[in-house]
Image (cartoon, rainbow, N blue to C red):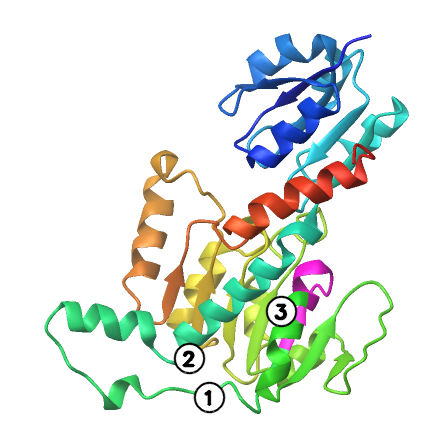
Amino acid sequence: MSSKVIITAPVHPYMLETLSSKGFDCVYMPSITYETLGDQIVDAVGIIVTTRLTIDAAMIDKGVQLKWIGRLGSGMELIDTTYAATKGIQCVSSPEGNRTTVGEHSLGLLLSLMNRIHSSYSEIQEGKWVRDLNRADELTGKTVGIIGFGNTGSAFAKLLTGFDVQILAVDILPKTFESPHIRLASLQEVQDQADVISLHLPLTELTYHYANEAFFAGLQKQPYFISTCRGQVTNTSALLKALQNQSIRAAGLDVLENEQLATYTAVEKEQLDQLMAMPQFLATPHIAGYSHEAYQRMAKVTLEKLGII
């Protein structure tokens, strides 16, 4: 019986050391292509993946000895989990491993925008010392809408408790909250009342372009907009229009619809250039869940869920 496990992405040494100590033969190929994985997976019992490769039915069929698929991080949209289940293949993800750092990054984006930190620093680099136009908005006392109250949404809410904010949580599942400052709300209530909106949704058919023109047109308080989930949850052209017509005060993204910048069409490049020219826009390269601590924690959570440790 094979003990081969394919690691398809960079992982913390903890994962390799633990798998090896449990008798697995680790094939570490962090740059492996889809085609090469198709050749390698034939005799593998397990694979570790991130967001780089699609594990579709065709790939699963090639893994005739495959027992499990471990996803580092959250979001299973690139894995055909339904088909895997018909083959008796266990699929796990590890959102518990990086939820804290995603929450912290969301807060960092928000505070930078509200306090004009990144934009005023850029002005200083240009030799400008501007105070009045960089007057901040306080987070304390505001109403924050968190759309998607799972691992990362609840982690963000936990960090916000020290700011004396009212949190409106939008989620498809019933929730109970320990804090009186958090309550379940409808999207309409968030659009009407929120000073800040933060997206923490998985990417599904229902959430694709969730933040579209209608979403932004329904906002009543010109909120700050934050997204650390999946780029395709937000429609880029709708976001650009919302900033231009001031439906939102500012936007902080850790994700883009297309994160392969070298492949951009002329339209995509023009949209991103327009966004980056705005002082009320801030973007980071999908690093919200990528802290040193989360790197190891995701490995540990994945192995725990697979029953390896």
Res. 116 in view: yes
Tell me residue 267's x, y (percent): 36, 46
Please indicate whether residue 71 sits to the left or right of residue 108 in the image.
right
* On-image quarter of the C terminus: top right
What residue type is disc 3 on? Phe
Q: Is residue 112 left or right of residue 84?
A: left
> Dots 2 and 3: beta carbons under 8 Å?
no
Q: Residues within 10 Å of mark 1 (few under 14, many from 20)?
A: few
Neighbour tally class for label 2: few under 14, some 14-19, many 20 plus, Cα within 10 Å? many
36 vs 98, nearest the viewer? 98
Q: Dot 3 corresponds to which residue? A: 156
Residue at 51 percent across and 85 percent down: it is 139
The percent position of residue 81, horizontal first and vertical second, equals 79, 33
Q: Is mark 2 on a helix, strand or loop?
A: helix
Please say whether residue 208 is one of the residues in the magenta stretch. Answer: no
The answer to whether marks 2 and 1 mark residues whose Cβ atoms lie closer than 8 Å is yes
- Sequence-wise, the earlier of marks 2 and 3 is 2
Which mark is drawn over residue 138? 1
Residue at figure coordinates x 43%, y 78% from the top left? 249
Tell me the magenta residue range.
145-154
CA–CA distance in space, label 2 to label 1: 7 Å
- In this rendering, is residue 69 above or below 148? above
Which amino acid type corresponds to the residue marked 2 in the rendered image? Met
Q: In which quarter of the image is the N terminus?
A: top right
Please state which of residues 190 and 68 is positioned toward the viewer in this rendering.
68
* Mark toward the start of the polypeptide (2 vs 1): 2
Q: Which of the marked residues, 3 or 1, is nearer the chain's N terminus?
A: 1
Q: What element carries label 3?
A: helix
Residue at (62%, 69%) from the top-left corner?
156
Residue picked out by circle 2: 114
Separation of marks 2 and 3 at Cα, in angstroms? 16 Å
Q: Do the residues labelled 3 and 1 touch (CB within 8 Å)?
A: no
